[in-house]
Image: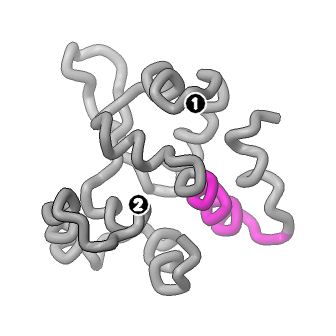
Amino acid sequence: MSTITTTATEHPGEGAEGRAHASIAVGRTRGYYRVLFDSGPVDAATFADLAGVPESSAHAWLAEQLEAGLLRAVDAPDGGAEELLLPGEFVPILLGDRGEPEFDGARSLLEQHRDELPHVLEAARLARVV
């Protein structure tokens, strides 16, 4: 099992939501959401290179995020395969909002889309799990 997904998949007794929360914790602890924020849409190979992890591990973690509704698939600029995007409205929650000016736009998006947050992200925000 990859080191990137070990924490997320070995969270006993909590089902899909527990695994999603564990996967979120992995992403926050290891800086993966920051990588996504800084890079914009990426495929698994690019994410792996930027995050310094094996491509198979990157693919597994990104798939967990997509399944939890935390990433969006978007068309690649070249019209090829899809890439994954961290929606701006999730940034203040997943990266931790300490009033940074670079998150001003993301905070505004969060306010506009607060009612549309994936359940796991809203539950984590309320419980301060993430």
Picture residue at 64% right of the left edge, 67% below the top:
17
Element at label 2: loop
Element at label 1: helix
Residue 54 lies, with reference to residue 1, above or below; the image says above
Tell me where residue 40 sits by quadrant.
top left
Picture residue at 64% right of the left edge, 23% below the top:
54
Left or right placement of residue 10 versus residue 43 in this view: right
Q: In the depicted view, which residue is nearer to us: 16 or 89?
A: 89
Q: Residues within 10 Å of mark 2 (few under 14, many from 20)?
A: some
Counting from the top left corner in percent of width and height, residue 66 is at: 48, 46
Picture residue at 77% right of the left edge, 70% below the top:
14
**Residue beneath disc 1:** 59
Picture residue at 60% right of the left edge, 41% below the top:
61
Alpha-carbon distance for marks 1 and 2? Answer: 20 Å
Quadrant location of the N terminus in the rendered image: top right
The residue at the far bottom in this view is 126
The colour mode here is one colour
The part of the chain drawn in magenta is 13-26
Label 1 close to label 2 by CB (< 8 Å): no
> Which residue type carries mark 2?
Leu
Secondary structure, magenta segment, majority class: helix
Counting from the top left corner in percent of width and height, residue 64 is at: 58, 47
